[in-house]
Amino acid sequence: MVETKLIVKYPFLSPSKEFIGEGVSQMDLKEAVAFAKDCFQREEHIAKDAARESKNLLLSRLMLYSIGQGFLRKFSFLKAREYSRLLEKEEKKVLFDMAKDFFPSLQNADGGYKVALVEYLQYGRSLPQANVLKGMVFFSEVELRACLREAIQERIADSEKLGGKLPADIAQAAVQLKEFIPREFTPQFKGKLLQRSELQNILKGVGEGKRYYGAMAIAIACLKDGLTKDEASEAMNAYVSNCSKGSHPFTAREGEAVVEWVYAHPAIGFSFNVLKSQGLV
């Protein structure tokens, strides 16, 4: 059972639905706009109570989806990172309880954790690299935290139930919110490679069939430019959001897996000739 005080800090948890209540007031909309604005402008948000934070997150997702799914994806990336950093300060029991909300089969196992394979496939990261035995996936606390961050991001970005026409007052608040959001999703990191026009063009997104190669190019450029893994993840999230969706969308999980692989192999080289051979430049 998730405690109410955890909903205040982590309003993406399933029990938050019980705190949302009926109706939306002008104060609700004002608070939700401020909540999303703080996120995009990297300002600290002071949590109030479970009902307020649960409604803030839901209304923010509704408004952002209505003005463009790319806005919602950016928001989900930033909030997942924020919540993950907050979670680092919690006791292991809190980590376990929160992870159970995404992985109901989660159990302690030999100093780490294990979950059912079918659940890992929904929120896990890289099955070929996973330790699988008899239908269960075993992983460390570090791996669980990484999976949980991606699971949080996917839950916030989930737009399946956000469709439909918004009431006029929420639609108007969404227009107001858009004024506070940076128009350009391509991060302007300082770096010898990332500042090159070829990489800037790739960051704007590429078509189906080239998206994996583009992701590799971005991740390697981030590594060679000395960006932290967090900064590389932000650049990758922007790239994924900007890529054409095609018949098979290139997901944030796929992009993050590329970042993880590249940063685990720091000796990998970068070549503009390779980009040309892949049709990226």
Image (cartoon, rainbow, N blue to C red):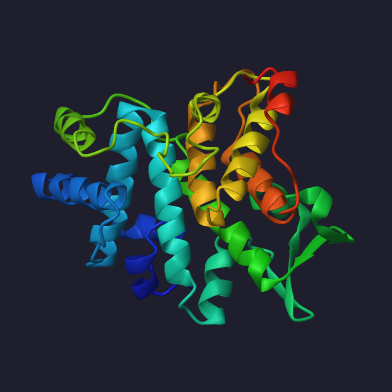
State the image quarter where residue 12 is shown: bottom left
Towards the viewer: 192 or 183:
192
Whether residue 133 is visible here, answered yes or no, is yes
Q: Residue at x 36, y 27 (%)?
A: 68
Q: Residue at x 23, y 66 (%)?
A: 46
Image quarter hosting the C terminus: top right
Up/down of 270 relative to 35, above or below: above
Q: Residue at x 59, y 37 (%)?
A: 218
Towards the viewer: 8 or 145:
145
**Residue most toward the right?**
134
Q: In this figure, what is the number of numbered marks?
A: 0
Up/down of 281 relative to 115, above or below: above
Q: Residue at x 56, y 80 (%)?
A: 92
Whether residue 22 is visible here, answered yes or no, is no
142 left or right of 160? right
Towards the viewer: 12 or 79:
79
Up/down of 221 relative to 279, above or below: below
Residue 4's x, y, as percent? 35, 72
Towards the viewer: 1 or 251:
251
Residue 146's x, y, as percent? 61, 60
**Residue most toward the front?**
192
Residue 259's x, y, as percent? 64, 47
19 left or right of 158? left
Residue 234's x, y, as percent? 48, 46
4 left or right of 224? left
State the image quarter where residue 240 is shown: top right
